Image (tube, grey):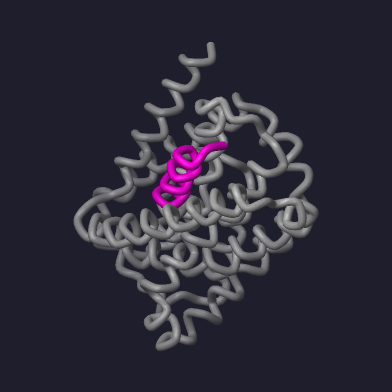
Amino acid sequence: MNMLQALLLGVIEGVTEFLPVSSTFHLLISTRLLGLPQTEFSKFFDVFIQAGAILAVFVLFAREWFTHLDMLKKVAVSFIPTAVVGFLLHNVIKDVFFSSFQAMVIVFMVVGVLFLVIEQWICKTDDQLKKTIAQMSWMQAVLIGLAQALAIMPGVSRAGAVIIAMLLLGFNREDAAKYSFTLAVPTILAAAALDLLKSRDILFQTGGADVALLLAGTVAAFVSAFIVVKWFIHFLRTQTFRLFGWYRLVVGAVLFWLVR
């Protein structure tokens, strides 16, 4: 991996982490298209640069979080089922879905279809999407956490699973996105901690050149995530998630065509 590739992967991580398009899927596909081998360092790199994306969300929303402590309690409840499922099925998912390109693309496209179907279903009843995070019940917090647990499969998207669940529960799009950003923090940190623990030997083998790549990727992820999250909130004030549904279908079809 060279510096340009590290910066590019950092941008891809930052752009896709909080959009409902699956950052894991995009990083895996991008690594493959760039011809980079799946080494222990490349896996470590993908996990490490998430810190930049998390920091961007913290900078943007920390003040809001600490003035809405009830929301943080709901986030903690949503995190529990995700943590349990992730811990129990971590190795199974890694072995099955991360090793099958076709499975990843199929899952990616299926979620795209779900977005289109759900948006079509609610387009005539948009006035029902009025719930805010403040109105969330404890049971709804649990259901959202269970939905997010599905995102351990690459291609689903953590943000996508949370947003779909919240739309079905009647929450407005902007609050659904904001809740997904907040829930991302403990979820990504826990997943990263588990992965880093299992590859901790890499920490002691990383040289100066590799450290530079890690820092470059992390900074690129921070800057791109900061920009995209601000854009996404503005976008959802007037738009639906159809764009992301069609994006998934088109990209999935192109990828199937490329590897046929």
Image point (62%, 53%), residue name: 208
Q: Quadrant of the N terminus?
A: top right
The image shows residue 203, relative to residue 4, as above or below, that is below
Residue 189 image point, x, y percent: 61, 65
User: Which residue is at the far top?
Assistant: 260
Residue nearer the viewer, 123 or 173: 173
Q: Is residue 24 magenta?
A: no
In the rendered structure, which segment of residues is drawn in magenta? 1-16
* Residue at point 60%, 24% (across, down): 102
Residue 2, position in %: x, y?
52, 38
Q: Nearer the viewer, residue 45 or 92?
A: 45
- Which is more toward the observer, 102 or 132? 102
The vertical placement of 260 against 210, above or below, is above
Position in image of residue 118 (x %, y %): 38, 45
Predominant SS along the magenta part: helix
Give how far across and how far down residue 73 sits, in percent. Answer: 55, 81
